Image (cartoon, rainbow, N blue to C red):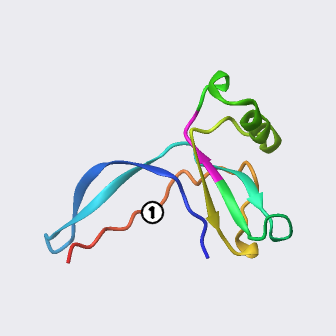
C-alpha cells in the first residue's frame, strides 16, 4: 500500500506527446503536506498515517488540536486526512512531502 497526499486542484491543462496528440492533465498544488500522527494497530485497531496540509493561524485552532500538533512538533494544518498503510510503509512524523512529485496524465477514453 502507498501513503496518500493532500492536494488542491488548481485547474486543467494539456501536454503534447511526441506524436503531436494532446493529453489532458490535472494541475495540483501541494501545500505543506506533513505527517502529523500514526495510527497503531494495538492502540487504534488499524495502521494509518494522519496527514495535514495547508497552514492555519494558531489563534483559530481549538486547544485540543493545538496539543495534537504540539506533540507532533508541526505547525497547525488546515486540512487533515488519514490514509491506511502497511506497517512497513509508515513515514516518520513531521516529515514533509517531497518537493517534486511526478505527474501522470489522465486518460480520456
Mark 1 Cα-neighbour bin, 10 Å: few <14, some 14–19, many ≥20: few
- Comparing 27 with 72, the one in front is 72
Expressed as whole percent of the image width and height from the top left, the position of residue 61 reads: 66, 29
Residue at image coords 85%, 64%: 43
Left or right: residue 51 compared with residue 30: right
Q: Quadrant of the C terminus?
A: bottom left
Residue at image coords 74%, 69%: 47
Give the quarter of the image for residue 39: bottom right
Q: Quadrant of the N terminus?
A: bottom right
Is residue 80 covered in magenta?
A: no
Expressed as whole percent of the image width and height from the top left, the position of residue 77 reads: 62, 39
Magenta: predominant secondary structure element? strand
Total marks drawn?
Answer: 1
- Comparing 6 with 100, the one in front is 6
Left or right: residue 9 compared with residue 1: left
SS category of the residue bearing label 1: loop
Left or right: residue 11 compared with residue 30: left
Q: Is residue 55 above or below residue 16?
A: above
Q: Which residues are magenta?
A: 51-55
Q: Is residue 94 above or below residue 87?
A: above
- Tell which residue pokes out farthest to the right in this image: 42
Say which residue label 1 marks.
102
Expressed as whole percent of the image width and height from the top left, the position of residue 97 reads: 60, 53
Residue at image coords 59%, 31%: 56
Expressed as whole percent of the image width and height from the top left, the position of residue 28 reads: 39, 51
Amino acid at each position: 500500500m502507498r501513503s496518500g497526499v493532500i492536494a488542491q486542484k488548481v485547474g486543467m491543462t494539456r501536454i503534447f506527446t511526441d506524436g503531436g496528440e494532446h493529453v489532458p492533465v490535472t494541475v495540483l498544488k501541494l501545500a505543506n503536506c506533513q505527517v502529523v500522527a500514526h495510527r497503531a494497530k494495538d492502540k487504534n485497531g488499524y495502521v494509518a498515517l494522519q496527514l495535514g496540509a495547508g497552514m492555519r493561524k494558531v489563534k483559530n485552532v481549538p486547544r485540543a488540536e493545538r496539543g495534537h500538533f504540539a506533540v507532533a512538533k508541526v505547525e497547525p494544518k488546515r486540512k487533515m486526512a488519514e490514509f491506511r498503510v502497511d506497517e512497513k510503509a509508515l513515514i516518520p512524523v513531521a516529515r514533509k512531502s517531497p518537493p517534486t512529485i511526478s505527474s501522470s496524465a489522465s486518460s480520456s477514453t
